[in-house]
Amino acid sequence: MKGVLLSFAAFLLYVVATALLSRILLVCRHAKLFIRTFLAAEAAYFLAYALTPANLWFLPARLLAPSPWLEILLGAFILALNFHSYFDWFFAFNGGFSTSLLLLLLRSRASSEELIAKFHDAGGRDKIYGWRLPRLEETGYLRINPATRVCSLTPKGRVVAILTRFIKRLLNLGHGG
Amino acid sequence: MTTGLLAAVATTILWILGHLVSMHIRPAGHRFIAMARAYLVSAPVLVALVFFLHGDATAYFYAALLHLLLFFLFVECFYHVERSVTLRLMVEILEAPRGQTSIDDIMKGYSVDDMIRRRLEDMSRSSLVTRSDGKWMLAPKGRRLARMMDFSCKIYRSKPQNERL
């Protein structure tokens, strides 16, 4: 039980730390901050596990792990699962496409055309592909020929696309997006 | 503890396999409800497995916890793949003739305009938004959700997609 309790404690600290750091630092890419802080949280969890007594000062004998190694790994795994849920929640809730639409409608009611206009900049470039394609190129998933504007996948991008297509078929999904 | 973990992993594999098979035989209209139903149906299987493996009270706790967290993981991974615009884009390039396509063709195939209209219809079906006189507005459920999102964006100082460029 010690591993589970420490894992949840590390996760709570992690959530508070990411919220505070997002406010203190000028964060351009939250993903980087979240991943780095997660690695620190995992390290803090292992350290806390090593430095605290087996009963955490209060646990009864029946809740002590018969196999500490399994418990320490389980705690680390639970922390990773909670991190994944939090990371996923953050990007769906704070940067998701539907979120953006709901926030626009929170300010004022709007027609479809007015909402569409909000997703284009002054030059007519849309804000979905506008940042996504250059980001994919920058992170090595895509090559864009500047003269012809033709896109092709890098080997790394190809692996991701093939894996995605396989999962979509396995889940019986359409194009999605 | 080991009993609980084994029971959780086995039950999770079972419900995911059952869910995948059923989605190929008869795809559900609402995927989340289908996943939640498969998860709930598997709960008695989890309890029975721990019982037959002679697990103690802590085994039930570990089994239930891991079973729940693995359910969240599956649902999240499902939506990563299903909703991701980036992944859709990459698959479209992969499937294009000679693995190449122009940005203009990508936009024609899946324009932002269509994406917005589709999401608005989806949100309307989920009772988050309503339409009146050609204008979209938030339904009470959507307003509550939007306020929470607004608060969260302020906490993390994050920008919605329409403000990123």
Image (cartoon, coloured by chain):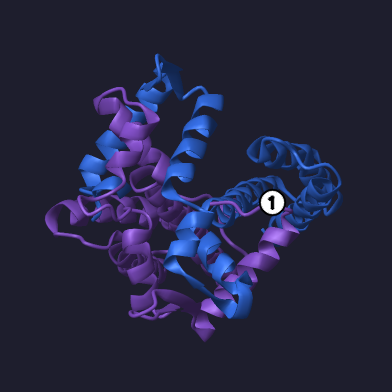
**In terms of image quadrants, where is residue A114?**
top left
Residue at position x 45%, y 52% from top?
Answer: A88
Residue at position x 35%, y 67% from top?
Answer: A35
| Image position, residue B65 (x, y; %) | 60, 48
**Chain represented in blue:** B
Chain on which label 1 sits: B
Q: Which residue is mark 1?
A: B59
Residue at position x 31%, y 67% from top?
Answer: A32
Mark 1: which secondary structure?
A: helix
Q: Mark yes or no: residue B160 visible.
A: no
Q: Colour of chain A?
A: purple
When the figure is inspected, residue A55 is found, relative to residue A73, above or below; the finding is above
| Image position, residue A41 (x, y; %) | 35, 64
Q: What is the residue that sits farthest to the bottom in this orientation?
A: A155
* Left or right for B81, reference A38: right
Residue nearest the observer in this picture, A116 or A57? A116
* Left or right for A120, reference A70: left
